[in-house]
Amino acid sequence: MSATPAAGIVPTTGSMDLLRFATAGSVDDGKSTLIGRLLLDSKAIFEDQLESVEATSSSKGYDYVDLALLTDGLRSEREQGITIDVAYRYFATPTRKFIIADTPGHIQYTRNMVTGASTADLGLVLVDARNGLTEQSRRHAVLLSLLRVPHLVLAVNKMDLVGWSQEVYERIHNEFTQFATKLNVPDLEVIPISALEGDNVVERSVNTPWYHGPTLMHHLEHVHVASDRDLVDTRFPVQYVIRPKSDEHHDYRGYAGQIAGGVLKKGDEVVVLPSGMTSTIEGIDLFNVEIDEAFPPMSVTVRLADDVDVSRGDMIARVNNAPKPAQDIDAMVCWMINEPMRPRQKLAIKHTTRMGRVLVKDIQYRLDVNTLHRDQDTKELGLNEIGRVQLRCTVPLLCDPYAKNRTTGSFVLIDEATGVTVGAGMINSGS
């Protein structure tokens, strides 16, 4: 096995900007091939990986290198030529680091797509230029909108199979743009590509002289995501209390976690929820080095000036800008198992670092993600269905609306008997 990656790979550093993006679209639109092309052309794969893919492609009788094999890691995925699970890949360019969630296209794996897109800064929807927009590509655009993914790219793939037709591209462009007006899509880019050939993926294509926009890689490198994060409302869910046992650090008491919103600074007056105790930040530590301030999505350890009672599941916020604890939750829920969700059902809930139990009070409606129709006659949610649900929690959640903060506004539901995650929720409001 080669010990070094292909020439040109860029080592990642802590100071580089990070973009998380998720792929979506119908089956055979070429999502995995596109990810493989990005990895190959950015020189982010090992030489022996490429040799293995070339050998596998040859053994299957292909006259081309099947780049989808770089991401479809499960044996069943390779055998069927489809993506089943969410495949995460990491690479970097001199400009930015990337985390890719390659999500499934089949309708029965919608829950996997929701999982992969829940933390994404950008959603990349592929359509086959020959087929145009399909029900599933519209479904995924709606889900990305519901998940408040702030940036959306429509990649019109397989343009080589329609003779690089400007007319085909513009028809799909106009149809999708019109559809997106019904959704909450603040930023949309439409790019004609060929993932198999590499046109307009990393390098600009000579086959599209009529297209004057960016290549896909250029857009991914330069799309602005820093302002998407909430830097006003300070939210710090406590993950772990650090109390070293050594004599050298016997007085040290820190609270570790990932910042979900706002900016923490030394000297800030803060409140610990749900107790309501106040203190000031004595120091902020990052990898044993004290820093002056921290912001999302940094993981840090916060030290307080006063010896207040803080434990896992608590939240540190600013005194005059703190979330109100809520036990009655109104949320959109994506159901993830075959056994349907029904009123009066009891489940466990995990919200940030806090655990509790909930009762399903009511299912108000099921959302048809193809037509956006609200079916108010439904009394349950089936596998992969999304609906508006009323929940009653046994412990107060320190939450915000999902539209305001995607971290403190989301949760997962768990079957207490099996420990299986059965649903993912996006909070509308709480009281």
Image (cartoon, helix red, strand yellow):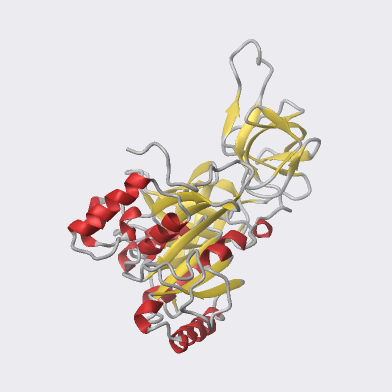
Is 59 or 174 nearer to us in this picture? 59
Query: What residue is at 71 percent from the left and 48 percent from the top?
Result: 234
Query: What residue is at 63 percent from the left and 59 percent from the top?
Result: 225
Q: What is the x, y in percent for residue 278?
A: 76, 36
Among the 4 quarters of the image, the one containing residue 274: top right
Q: What is the x, y in percent for residue 2?
A: 36, 39
Is 344 or 206 nearer to us in this picture? 206
Quadrant placement of the N terminus: top left
Among the 4 quarters of the image, the one containing residue 378: bottom left
Horizontally, is 276 left or right of 44 in the view?
A: right
Horizontally, is 68 left or right of 255 in the view?
A: left
Label tally: 0
- Can residue 369 be seen? no
Query: What residue is at 61 percent from the left and 34 percent from the top?
Result: 256
Among the 4 quarters of the image, the one containing residue 114: bottom left
Quadrant placement of the C terminus: bottom right
Q: What is the x, y in percent for residue 233?
A: 71, 52
Tell me: residue 260, above or below residue 314: below
Query: What residue is at 67 percent from the left and 51 percent from the top?
Result: 324
Q: What is the x, y in percent for residue 251?
A: 69, 17
**Residue at the farthest top position:** 247
- Can residue 249 be seen? yes
Tell me: residue 118, above or below residue 396: below
